[in-house]
Amino acid sequence: MSSSLFVSRRNRRTPFTDRIEAHGVTGFSIVNHTLLPKSFGRSVEEDYWHLREHVQLWDVSCQRQVEIQGKDAKKLVQRMTPRDLSKAEVGQCLYAPLIDENAGMINDPVILKRAEDWYWMSIADSDVLLWAKGLSLGMDLEVQIQEPDVSPLAVQGPKAEILMSRVFGKPVTMLKFFHFGEYSFEGRKLVIARSGYSRQGGFEIYLDQTAMGGKLWDTLWEAGKDLEVSPGCPNLIERVEGGLLSYGNEMTRENNPLECNLERYCNLDGTIDCVGMTRLREVAKKGIQQRIRGIVFEGEASPPCGFPWPLIHDAQKAGYTTTVVWSPRLKTNLALAMVRKEFWATNQELLVELPDGTQRKGFVTDLPFKEMAGTIG
Amino acid sequence: MSSSLFVSRRNRRTPFTDRIEAHGVTGFSIVNHTLLPKSFGRSVEEDYWHLREHVQLWDVSCQRQVEIQGKDAKKLVQRMTPRDLSKAEVGQCLYAPLIDENAGMINDPVILKRAEDWYWMSIADSDVLLWAKGLSLGMDLEVQIQEPDVSPLAVQGPKAEILMSRVFGKPVTMLKFFHFGEYSFEGRKLVIARSGYSRQGGFEIYLDQTAMGGKLWDTLWEAGKDLEVSPGCPNLIERVEGGLLSYGNEMTRENNPLECNLERYCNLDGTIDCVGMTRLREVAKKGIQQRIRGIVFEGEASPPCGFPWPLIHDAQKAGYTTTVVWSPRLKTNLALAMVRKEFWATNQELLVELPDGTQRKGFVTDLPFKEMAGTIG
């Protein structure tokens, strides 16, 4: 079994790993030094259809929390992102690009504002803890920074709301998108947010006690049997169709947030003094030269994309793919891609060059992908 | 194939991945967001015997370099480690614990001093780049910090020296242990060190141009055919027998370097002003309460250790295992373990509690493991 390659303490187990194994997990990925289940013996396509119709439990404990607390917490958090957090309210989830001194993307967490002096950053795959600690030590700030015992469990899919209301009661269904509250479970208050890494709706439960993982999983499982609840994981087809970006795939430290379509999370009016802001404003003034766009391309189901594949137009390099999938619903290949300015217009034709050297006709499209308006010319 | 689960740009390919695939790699692990080949269809035991007799090429590109350069480089590097680097010489490799403000282990790189104002940190699995950048920004230092296009290829095993001399000439065999030099290859100077994550001897070639990966691999491969050269990877059995520690397994941020037997890399006389030094000196004064030790334990070949297993003595918790293997040479189970002070004496008897609840008799031993002097009583 592939997962046996990952048996080491370095690849950290989660409060739900026992249950995942009982469900016959057949493979893991690693995010933030933590196991992320990737497969349960069904195809990505089967999982995709199930996610769109029913409800799934995702062990996304790998979304580790960087907890920043104390007198200077607000100052440090704002120092880390170009998003204006001055009007953020307790109970809000805030998607926020984190950038370095060159305005390069370091991570794109969801920040939970728990109190005026207490934040959780629910992170993608990089050690934001070390970045935050380094900054705060160097700046001599009064903050405590740690990775608490908090492990998100996502409940995703159209039946998520009914399942959650059965376990946590009606009030949880009143949560607004990207807001969180505290809800009782077994005599404990758990943070629950209406959020998640899919476009099918759902919740994320921030379990804060490892020992309670089995109980939480089992309770949701029992309550969801007639809803066809299933174990799952972020689905590659659904994510790409929905235009959801992935740190490490669509964006790296080489990219600034404007290239990643994150303008609306960047306050460039000069009032925000974060690391990299000077550089980011220069970039904005000059104008970006490339941007993440959708690509639709012809031919049979493409192999997955393990490194950037060139996009070509008239023998010129027009950009590169970052993620590629076959969409069984749209019945075509889709790519997320970094496309140069001269070529990023909707319906721009270009060629996708696969690792075997073949070139396939495609065109540029908006995100998220829609039922196909254009055709491959 | 298990490796298909890892096809994404986030899990970065290396200059050698094409060759590794041509050799039929059957699984990868992920270190520093980079593919580390873990298996070539042979058992870990077969690889172990081969490594002890012949020579292997290891794609350890995942040992990413954190390059620190500039006027304040020396200051920043010393700020990051309790090891006294004041007398370090250009051309030296320096194993160095990196610690945080609580004296917790952040990483344990080999530092290559390339010039007075130019360092490479060849890192284990955590984003030291972010830590270094955060510190330097906060402290407002004049340094450039980046991850250069440098990918180590290890040549390990008793025949490593003869293979290296065939490709790089006699001078490379004059290298002293944990020193590096520059050697010509295809008109380029490559940094080569006598080092590597095994006890069988060997070298690490710091390839600094991705495009040259295939050529370097093929040249070593052709030159090594009669030496039974083989693709390989750090071998779990060999590493544990040799008492080589692994960051994330034997040590985490929860551990200080003294607990990890790294006293000789900590200058505690008060002359070193690194992050965490105040705390580390307090710890040293008070005396540590636990330490990494070897454990030998009975019974059939143990399953691998995916999380700490309790060590028990008279119903008391004596510590926990961090890595477990069956040694085919010593014909017993070996563990690296964090053992409490009251129980860490050599030959101390204790029980290892496996995940299935069974307890096996064992005893404490020195590291590295030797031909067995004691017996399981």
Image (cartoon, coloured by chain):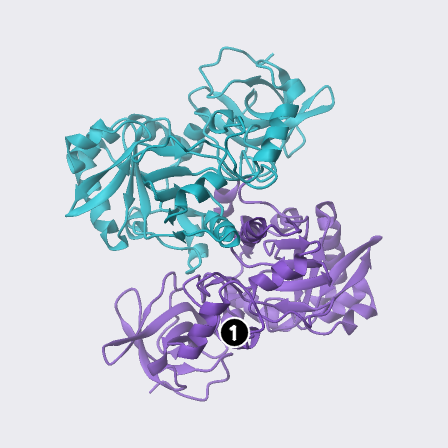
Chain colours: A purple, B cyan
For residue B112, which quarter of the picture?
A: top left
Three-letter code, disc 1:
Leu
For label 1, the SS is loop
Q: How far across and how far down the image is residue B234, in percent?
A: 39, 36
- Pinpoint residue A358: horizontal percent, then vertical percent: 27, 71
Is residue B233 in view? no
Please state if B203 lies on the left or on the right of A51 as rendered. left
Q: Toward the viewer: B116 or B165?
A: B116
Provide residue B288's location: percent of width, then percent of height: 63, 25
Q: Compared to A80, does B83 lie above or below?
A: above
Residue at left 29%, top 35%? B91
Q: Quadrant of the C terminus of chain A?
A: bottom left
User: Where is mark 1, residue-wise?
Assistant: A262
Please name the residue shown 63% across and 29% down the image: B282
Q: Nearer the viewer, residue B262 or A8?
A: B262
Q: Does residue A290 appear in this view?
A: yes
Q: Chain of mark 1?
A: A
Binning the other alpha carbons within 10 Å of mark 1 as few (below 14), some (14 to 19) or many (20 upward) gives some
Residue at the image point whose x is 77% and y is 57% from the top:
A190
Q: In the shown orientation, is residue A194 left or right of residue B255?
A: right
